[in-house]
Amino acid sequence: MNIERLKEIREDKDLLQKDIAKVLDITQVQYSRYETGVRVIPIYHLIKLAIFYNTSTDYLLGLTDERKPYPKSILKK
């Protein structure tokens, strides 16, 4: 996981760790551990962040530099 990406995208939106922790319904300390790589971010939090930031999980994971999200799935209704 590209932990720098989590901090970068948060700071690009002028948000604090406590703001993102609130979105994920966790403590700021817990979120800080995701950003620093002390703890691995659970998939359900990763998905929630991708939706919140309107990007892809691949971008958050550092697998692509394209911020634009993928088109919505036709299977998800």
Image (spheres, grey):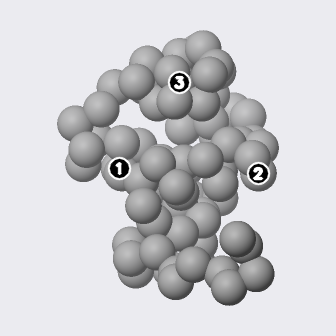
What residue sits 53% from the left and 69% below the top? 56
User: Sequence order check: which comes first, mark 3 or mark 2?
Assistant: 3
Q: How far is disc 1 from disc 3 in space, using C-alphas?
A: 15 Å
The three-letter code of the residue at mark 1 reads: Glu
Q: Are marks 1 and 3 in contact (CB under 8 Å)?
A: no
Three-letter code for the amino acid on which mark 2 is drawn: Ile
- Are the two marked residues, 3 and 2, in contact with CB atoms closer than 8 angstroms? no
- Labels 1 and 3: the sequence-earlier one: 1
Pair 1/3: label in front: 3
| Residue type, mark 3 in image | Ala
Nearer-the-camera pick, 72 or 15: 72
Distance, label 3 to label 2, CA atoms, is 15 Å
SS at mark 1? helix
- What residue would you read off at disc 3? 21
Image disc number at residue 43? 2
Q: Which dot marks residue 8?
A: 1
Of callouts 2 and 1, the N-terminal one: 1
Q: Would you call the spot at circle 3 few (<14 residues within 10 Å), some (14-19), or many (20 or more)?
A: some
- Which quarter of the figure has residue 14? top left
- Residue 40's x, y, as percent? 75, 42
Picture residue at 36% right of the left edge, 42% below the top: 10
- Element on which disc 2 rests: helix
- Res. 18 image quadrant: top left
